[in-house]
Every structure is written in C-alpha cells, then in structure tokens.
C-alpha cells in the first residue's frame, strides 16, 4: 500500500495528469471549432479533464498519507537522520490534527471528482421530450421537486460520511505503521546490543595499538560469517567500524538482507559509536542513532 501511494505521489502521476488534461483540452477545442454537433466528443473532453483533476487530487491525498508515514518519527519525538522535523511535527496532538484535516479535505475533493468522472462516463439520456409529454413532465417536476432536493441532501451526506470513513481508515493505517516502526526499531536496537563483544574488541584494539583494526582478523575476531548476533547473519569489521548484515531468513522483511553500519570514531583512546543506514529506512533506526551509542 505504501509503495502504491508513493507511486501516485510521484512525477509520473503528475505527468499523466498533465497529459490527460492536454488531451482533454485538445478534444474540447476540436469540438468547439469543428465538431459542435458531436456531443460525444464534448463529453469525452470533459471526462478527460475531470480524470486529470482526479489524478491530481489522488496525488495530493497520497502526499498527505506519505507525509504522515514519514512524520511518525517526528510525532513520536523521534528524529530521522534525513528528515527535517518542524515544530508542529514534534507535537503529536498538533501533528495528527494537521494530517487529519488535510486527509479529510483532499479525500472529500477526490471523492467528489470520482463521482464527477463516473457521471461523465455514464451515457446521457436523450434531452428531447415529445410536446405531448411536456405538461405531464412539468407537473411531475413540481410534485417531485422536494423529493429530489431530499435525495441531493442525502447524497451530500453520503459523500461526507464516505470521506470521513476513508480519512479515518487512512489515519488508522498511519497509526498502525507507527507500531510497526517501533517494532522494527526495537529489532535493530537488539541487534546493536548483540554486537557488544565485537565493539569491545575494537575498543580494546584501539587502546592497545593506538589505531582502529582493519578487519576481523586484526581485531582477533572470527570471520564475518562466524559472528551472528540477534537477527544478524554476519558482522564484519571494516576499518574499525562494524558492518551488520541482517539475516534474510529470520529478520523482518524490511530488514532481511540489509545492512547497517556502526561507525567507530576515535576520541583519543576512546571510541564514539554512531550508526548509519546503508539500505535500511531511517525510520527503523533507534532513537538518537546519530548520537553516541
């Protein structure tokens, strides 16, 4: 679902909307200039322009949803390495209020645009009515006018409630993603804790030799494949830093086969440990990952 939303909120979706709009405008100009008697051509142009509007609004909705996914770290007081957290993102109540309002607003516009596209796609009923039926139709319109107004009001309420349902589901999904982020962050933190002996070996080597070890052999450690921590398939020493590889069979799918680097920075005879992601999403790194571990 997240991949689909990020695809909708992309340059490809924007270009598709521009293409649909351009094609709709071309058809409309052709109808207005040369084929005014072709109602189907006019409806086709309106349909394409409405469809382009729907694509744009869907992109806006996807932007809000993905922004909520990217902002869960900020809303929970956790800072990503590559995301800038603004003041309102760091306040959970204000963050959810803004995301909720934006989700409802763009969802409502998207639902209205969807209804418009469906109506334009439906075949139009003939407009001509025989003269003998005009009086009967006028009488029926007078009688059924209140009923039609009530139906229109009911349709609007249905749109409002449908929009609210979609918005609530979206926010619930974003909230559930926060639980998943917390669980994955916990797994990564446990993996970091499980390589404490390897970190100690690097620190001892620095104290004894005044420099960081180049590899596992220099640090008096087994080969990388022989070091398996919590959810890790191997631990490799790379110029003092530790390259952690998550096990493809036991780790979560968002971590399986991926790498995290524990960077060793010298501070005199001490080592300051920092973590950096190789191919793991920043959201899954522990709190204050850029700080000393």
Image (spheres, rainbow, N blue to C red):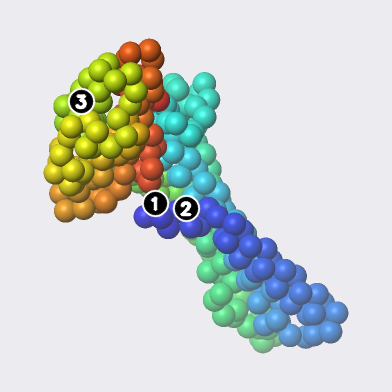
Where disc 1 sits, the SS reads: helix
- Contact check, label 3 and label 2, Cβ < 8 Å: no
The relative height of residue 243 versus residue 54 in the rendered view (above or below) is above
Residue 13 in the figure: left or right of residue 229: right
* Residue 242 image offset from top left, x and y in percent: 29, 34
| Residue under the point 20% across and 25% down | 201
Q: Name the quadrant of the C terminus.
A: top left
Using the image, tell me which numbered label, if any, was put on residue 10: none
Please name the residue that numbered disc 2 is placed on. 6
Q: Who is closer to the viewer here, 120 or 4?
A: 4
Farthest-out residue, front: 209
Q: What separation in Å lies between label 1 and label 2 (alpha carbons)?
A: 6 Å
| Residue under the point 50% across and 57% down | 8
* Residue 208 image offset from top left, x and y in percent: 25, 18
- Contact check, label 1 and label 2, Cβ < 8 Å: yes
Q: Earlier in the sequence, mark 3 or mark 1?
A: 1
Around disc 1, counting alpha carbons within 10 Å, would you say few (fewer than 14), some (14 to 19), or many (20 or more)?
A: few
Where disc 3 sits, the SS reads: helix
Around disc 3, counting alpha carbons within 10 Å, would you say few (fewer than 14), some (14 to 19), or many (20 or more)?
A: some
Please name the residue that numbered disc 1 is placed on. 2
Judged by depth in the image, the label closer to the viewer, 3 or 1, is 3
| Residue under the point 37% across and 55% down | 1
Residue 232 in the figure: left or right of residue 82: left
Residue 42 in the figure: left or right of residue 270: right
One can see residue 167 in this view = yes
Please name the residue that numbered disc 3 is placed on. 201
* Residue 186 image offset from top left, x and y in percent: 23, 32
- Contact check, label 3 and label 1, Cβ < 8 Å: no
Where disc 2 sits, the SS reads: helix
Q: What separation in Å lies between label 3 and label 2 (alpha carbons)?
A: 43 Å
């Amino acid at each position: 679902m997240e991949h689909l939303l990020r695809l909708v909120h992309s340059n490809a979706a924007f270009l598709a909307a521009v293409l649909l709009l351009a094609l709709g405008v071309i058809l409309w100009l052709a109808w207005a200039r040369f084929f005014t008697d072709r109602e189907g051509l006019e409806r086709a142009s309106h349909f394409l322009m409405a469809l382009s509007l729907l694509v744009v609004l869907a992109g806006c909705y996807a932007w809000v949803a993905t922004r909520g996914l990217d902002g869960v770290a900020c809303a929970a007081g956790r800072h990503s390495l590559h995301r800038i957290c603004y003041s309102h993102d760091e306040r959970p109540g204000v963050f959810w209020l803004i995301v909720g309002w934006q989700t409802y607003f763009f969802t409502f516009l998207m639902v209205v645009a969807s209804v418009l596209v469906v109506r334009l796609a439906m075949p139009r009923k003939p407009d001509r009515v025989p003269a003998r039926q005009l009086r009967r139709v006028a009488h029926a319109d007078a009688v059924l006018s209140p009923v039609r107004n009530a139906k229109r009001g009911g349709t609007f309420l249905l749109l409002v409630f449908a929009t609210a349902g979609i918005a609530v589901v979206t926010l619930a999904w974003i909230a559930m993603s926060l639980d998943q982020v917390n669980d994955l962050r916990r797994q990564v933190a446990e993996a970091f804790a499980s390589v404490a002996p390897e970190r100690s070996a690097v620190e001892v080597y620095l104290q004894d030799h005044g420099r960081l070890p180049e590899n596992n052999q220099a640090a008096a450690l087994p080969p990388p494949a022989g070091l398996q921590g919590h959810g890790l398939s191997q631990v490799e020493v790379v110029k003092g830093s530790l390259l952690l590889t998550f096990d493809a069979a036991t780790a979560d799918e968002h971590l399986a086969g991926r790498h995290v680097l524990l960077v060793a920075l010298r501070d005199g005879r001490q080592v300051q440990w920092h973590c950096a992601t190789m191919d793991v999403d920043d959201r899954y790194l522990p709190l204050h990952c850029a700080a000393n571990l």
